[in-house]
């Protein structure tokens, strides 16, 4: 028995080293596959798998296959830090792709900074995350809101009302709306910040009517706040007051709201499934072949797809998957022909220069793109965060509140 | 302040309070009559909403989907009582833990069955104008719905034979059994009625709050606090508390900001519980 045990242990050890001898490049993934945030997490993880599959099918990076070590953070912050540590200490990953909420990003950022492993964050967010190991492929609030507010002031008129969630995404976005409204000759005539659990929007809708705006910037987060759009439409205000949003559609809200409420809503994002270019056509075809076409692809999924490909391009350029070499390569202005148009990793701020699309909701739970702002720079991040000049920065910049 | 603004604030606050009351009554019945804290109340609401949604999508008129939602949640409620709750009577914390676990299970089941996004049915697009303001019509309709629900539950519990049995089995279980009331069956029915009321709430509020797996969470905290503040005279207490807290929070939100509205709700709740640890109705002489 004892001999048997020893033999099997040797066999296991041999098997383990044999696996190691295949010398794959390992990357880590932590997304919310279960729990309240899996509306986003599942698509992010699917996008990562698809990207790795497409890279491996094309011969891998530097001729080696990419292997994914995947974790389910269960929509819980403690799981993020736990798995981030595991992936660094045990799995020996070369890069990490993880996170949806800003709190999850802030929780694990220091871990990859300490380990000096490139960490890709792929979600639209409030902006300002800055350190040498962190690379952001989602669009930041200022990046999306600048074209949106400019467009809306022109389209509807100068008076702006802000409806936003009561936490940093909402308050920082509101700051940018104020700033860009002013820059474009508009004025913010009222704001209301709402808890995520509010379900009754009658008070907000009254205040909107009282302050007579030309358009409302609505940033509903979560299912409850989506109800605002429904109630706003039912109050009969949609025809006289425009509604624009930088996050409507990011969780497929256009599927949830009724066609009556969704028609005519304006959204701005870095990606819509309706984007018309060859890279997107190919991407959508691959996606639907593997995952079906029940649910429209959200921008967060494309952000992950772009992150993996930008990383792979950097590995090719560095000639090695060694984290330090890859970070240096990522700071050389890598570009990628993405489903949402050509994107460029900004060397200084580690944010992505990308197109911002403005789309109008139709009456069939979909969008049609009305305007494309090409190659929009993450201006605020570029201004605050120059990691080429000061590589030791580790900050989360927020604009002064006014 | 213009008169039309005041009138709309008043009307919409009344409808806010009614929505809170609709979401609360089922919890009030289960907690007030049985002493069971059902932390899965919000998920029963969610089940009601999804049932109504599914049935509506299958072509049944929305109005008929409401009784179907009630029936489905009552059946699920009865099964839950049979399998879980009736083993835990008198063990308050164990029931809380069990129903909380149940809520997580229901939530994940909803994600697995319906996915994370399903199309809503939308709100009936009619609105009424008060001076220069316009109000969505459907939420105003909820004032009538809440009143009807209140009257129905009051009559059910005071005038029907079942109601008397239900109160007897909870107040003095052994005496009720001695005179021939099968208290375990009565309790099952009461829990099931509570769940059915939650299902009704989910279905009737569906046009206002779209069905999502996590929708229960938004209601359960405020509903729970309303029932606790109400105290032992559950039904009348809940109605008055919902009017005061829900309506007050809505008025505050209209004149100030939504954050201040929420602060009002929670500060007044804390204050009332400090003044009346057993609930505002602790010294009332009414029974329901």
Image (spheres, coloured by chain):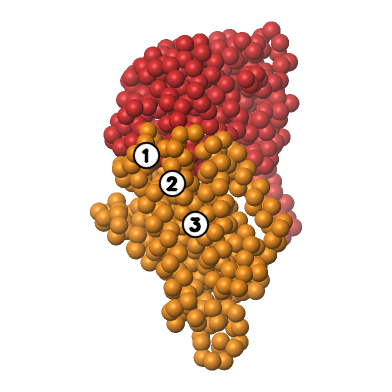
SS of the residue under disc 2: helix
- Mark 2 = which residue? B11
Which residue is at 60% across, 79% downward? B171
Where is residue A360? Give x, y as percent: 34, 26
Q: Are marks 2 and 3 in contact (CB under 8 Å)?
A: no
Q: In this picture, is A16 found above or below B180?
A: above
Tell me the element at label 3: helix
Is the residue marked by circle 1 packed among few (<14), some (14-19), or many (20+) residues within 10 Å? Answer: some
Tell me, yes or no, whether dots 3 and 1 are on the same chain: yes
Examine the rendering and report whether any part of residue A141 can be seen.
Answer: yes
Q: Quadrant of the C terminus of chain B?
A: bottom right
Residue at (49, 52) in percent of width and height: B17
Instruction: Tell me the tag on residue B130.
Output: 1
Q: Colour of chain B?
A: orange
The one of A44 and A362 positioned closer to us in this rendering? A362
Q: Nearer the viewer's eye, disc 3 or disc 1?
A: 1
Q: Earlier in the sequence, mark 2 or mark 3?
A: 2
Residue A155: name its quadrant: top left
On screen, residue A303 above or below A181? below
Residue A126: x and y, percent?
A: 57, 25
User: Is circle 2 on the same chain as circle 3?
Assistant: yes
Residue A236, x across and y down, in percent: 33, 36
Query: Which residue is the site of mark 3?
Result: B21
Give yes or no for contact between labels 2 and 1 (Cβ–Cβ under 8 Å): yes
Q: Are marks 2 and 1 on the same chain?
A: yes
Structural crowding at the residue carrying mark 2, measured as other residues with C-alpha within 10 Å and reported as few (<14), some (14–19) or many (≥20): some
Residue at the location (57% across, 72% down)? B286
Q: The disc numbered 1 marks a residue on which chain?
A: B
Q: Which chain is red?
A: A
């Amino acid at each position: 028995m004892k001999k048997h045990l020893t033999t099997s242990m040797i066999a296991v050890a041999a098997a383990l080293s044999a696996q190691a001898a295949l010398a794959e490049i390992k990357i880590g993934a932590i997304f919310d596959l279960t729990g309240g945030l899996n509306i986003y997490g599942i698509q992010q993880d699917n996008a990562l798998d698809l990207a790795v599959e497409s890279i491996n099918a094309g011969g891998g990076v530097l001729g080696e296959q990419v292997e994914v070590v995947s974790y389910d953070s269960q929509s819980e912050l403690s799981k993020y830090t736990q798995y981030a540590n595991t992936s660094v200490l045990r799995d020996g990953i070369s890069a990490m792709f993880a996170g949806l909420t800003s709190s999850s990003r802030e929780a694990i950022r220091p871990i990859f900074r300490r380990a000096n492993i490139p960490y890709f964050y792929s979600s639209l967010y409030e902006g300002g995350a800055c350190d040498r190991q962190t690379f952001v492929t989602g669009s930041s609030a200022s990046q999306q809101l600048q074209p949106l507010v400019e467009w809306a002031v022109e389209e509807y008129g100068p008076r702006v009302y802000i409806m936003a969630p009561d936490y940093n995404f909402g308050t920082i976005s509101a700051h940018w709306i104020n700033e860009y409204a002013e820059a474009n000759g508009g004025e913010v005539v009222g704001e209301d910040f709402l808890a995520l659990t509010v379900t009754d929007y009658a008070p907000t809708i009254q205040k909107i009517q009282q302050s007579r705006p030309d358009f409302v910037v609505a940033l509903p987060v979560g299912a409850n706040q989506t109800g605002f759009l429904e109630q706003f439409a039912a109050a009969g205000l949609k025809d006289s007051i425009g509604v624009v949003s930088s996050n409507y559609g990011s969780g497929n809200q256009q599927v949830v709201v009724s066609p009556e409420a969704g028609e005519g809503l304006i959204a701005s994002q870095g990606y819509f499934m309706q984007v018309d270019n060859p890279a997107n056509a190919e991407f959508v075809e691959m996606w639907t072949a593997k995952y079906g076409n029940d649910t429209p692809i959200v921008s967060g999924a494309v952000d992950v797809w772009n992150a993996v490909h930008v990383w792979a391009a950097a590995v090719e350029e560095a000639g090695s998957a060694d984290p330090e070499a890859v970070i240096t390569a990522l700071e050389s202005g890598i570009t990628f022909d993405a489903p949402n148009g050509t994107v460029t990793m900004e060397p200084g701020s580690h944010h992505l220069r990308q197109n911002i699309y403005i789309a109008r909701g139709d009456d069939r739970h979909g969008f049609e793109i009305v305007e494309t702002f090409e190659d929009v720079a993450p201006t605020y991040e570029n201004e605050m965060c120059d990691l080429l000049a000061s590589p030791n920065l580790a900050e989360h910049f927020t604009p002064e509140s006014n | 302040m213009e008169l039309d603004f005041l009138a709309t604030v008043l009307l919409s606050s009344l409808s806010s309070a009614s929505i809170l009351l609709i979401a609360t009554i089922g919890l009030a019945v289960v907690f007030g009559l049985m002493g069971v804290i059902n932390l899965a109340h919000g998920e029963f609401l969610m089940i009601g909403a999804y049932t109504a949604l599914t049935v509506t999508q299958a072509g049944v008129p929305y109005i008929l989907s409401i009784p179907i939602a009630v029936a489905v949640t009552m059946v699920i409620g009865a099964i839950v009582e049979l399998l879980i709750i009736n083993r835990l009577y008198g063990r308050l914390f164990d029931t809380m833990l069990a129903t909380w676990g149940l809520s997580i299970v229901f939530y994940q089941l909803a994600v697995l069955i319906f996915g994370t996004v399903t199309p809503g049915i939308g709100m009936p697009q009619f609105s009424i104008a008060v001076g220069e303001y316009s109000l969505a019509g459907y939420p105003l309709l909820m004032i009538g719905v809440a009143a009807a629900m209140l009257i129905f539950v009051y009559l059910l519990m005071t005038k029907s034979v079942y109601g008397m049995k239900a109160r007897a089995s909870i107040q003095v279980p052994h005496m009720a059994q001695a005179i021939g009331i099968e208290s375990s069956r009565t309790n099952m029915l009461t829990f099931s009625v509570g769940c059915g009321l939650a299902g009704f709430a989910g279905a009737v509020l569906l046009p206002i709050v779209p069905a999502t797996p996590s929708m229960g969470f938004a209601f359960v905290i405020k509903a729970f606090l309303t029932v606790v503040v109400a105290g032992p005279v559950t039904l009348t207490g809940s109605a008055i508390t919902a009017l005061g807290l829900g309506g007050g929070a809505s008025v505050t939100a209209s004149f100030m900001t939504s954050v201040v509205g929420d602060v009002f709700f929670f500060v007044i709740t804390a204050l009332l519980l400090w003044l009346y640890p057993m609930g505002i109705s602790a010294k009332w002489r009414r029974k329901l």
